[in-house]
Every structure is written in structure tokens, then in C-alpha cells.
Image (tube, helix red, strand yellow):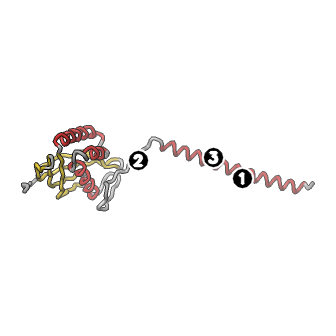
Amino acid sequence: MDYERQTLDLTQLRAQNLRLLLSVGLLTVGQLLSLLVILGLVGRERTIVVPPSLQKSFWVSGTAVSSEYLEQMGAFVTWLILDVTPASITWKTHTLLGYVEPDQYGALKTRQDVESARLQRLNASTSFAPQQLTVNEEAKRVVVRGRLRTQVNGVETSNLYKAYQILFRYDGGRIQLHAFEEVPYGGAQPAP
């Protein structure tokens, strides 16, 4: 027997075993790190909310949002609240509540439930045609002016100029609806 050859083969086998052991060790460490990352993510939820369609580019930062974003969100919220029929108010309310600040959720849900019952009882619908959106970026406020048209059983019962103020909060990378209220139109014109 060749003692030198056997010693060389044994040395090569030991080196190969050491490489395999290191590879298995690195794979084990990688698996453990992956497990720790997955366990760290359990229970975390990220909700990304944007307007359903983007007409303008906008920016957001840690504590502020651009006026373009507020304008688009204001128009979207106005559409969800004021352009409703007995058939659409339920799903529009459900969509709207996904954007509402937690402190205001109950009040707005109650308001929308009352409005839903009223629309269904009267077989009424409303549509709002925005004519002007005024944005205050610092206050995160949008004032929407336009015409609110109401129909009962397919017959127009009112067509009035109205103005609504929408207040938003921006916290944790998410914009939320804080308030939606009617305000004086300011130089309201009578509807023809």
C-alpha cells in the first residue's frame, strides 16, 4: 500500500468534509435569519392607499402631502359621499370607511347609514358636479364647490350650489379623512 497516497486522499477528504460542514453551517445560519425576519413581520400590516385614478403627479413626505394629492383625495371623497344612489351607497360607504380616521369612524358610519336608509326609503339619488377645489396644504383642508342635484323617483327635486370642507390627517404614511362638512358657499348663485 502506498502510505503517501492514502494520507493525501485522507487530507483531501477532510478538506472536502470541512467545506461541506461550512456550507451546511452557512445555510443553517441563513435559514435562522430568514425565520427571524419572518417572525418579525408576523402581525405587521401595511396598507397602501391611493386615489383610484391619478390625474396629476404628487409627493408625500414624513409629515406633509402635496396639494395635488389633497385635491385628488378631496375629489374622490366627495364622489364617494355625494354621488350616490340606493344601489351604490352601501359599497361607496364601505370604500369610504377605509379612508376614515379611527376616531371619526363611528360618527361617519352612523351618518352614512342614516343617509343610506333615507335614500332607499325615498328612492332618491344625489349627484355632485364639482366646479372648484380650493386646497390648503398646511391645514390639509380641501373646500369643494359645485352643484348638488337631488332626484326622488327620477324627478329632480333640487339643484343647488353647495360647498363642502374636507379635512384630512396625514400620519404614519397614510392620509385619513378627519371631517366632511357643508360650509357656506360664499357668493352662492341661484340654480337656474
Q: CA distance from mark 3 to mark 2?
A: 29 Å
Residue 80: percent from left, percent from top: 25, 49
On screen, residue 144 versus residue 170, left or right, reads left
In percent of the image, x 51 and y 42: which residue is there? Answer: 39
Q: CA distance from mark 2 to mark 1?
A: 41 Å
Farthest front residue in view: 153
Vertical comparison of 109 with 67: above or below: above
Q: Secondary structure at mark 2?
A: loop
Q: Nearer the viewer, residue 74 or 80?
A: 80
Looking at the rendered structure, the kind of residue marked 1 is Arg
Looking at the rendered structure, the kind of residue marked 2 is Arg
Give residue 19's mark. 1
On screen, residue 56 versus residue 149, left or right, reads right
Q: Report which residue position mark 3 lands on.
A: 28
Q: Report which residue position mark 2 lands on.
A: 46
Residue 138: percent from left, percent from top: 25, 53
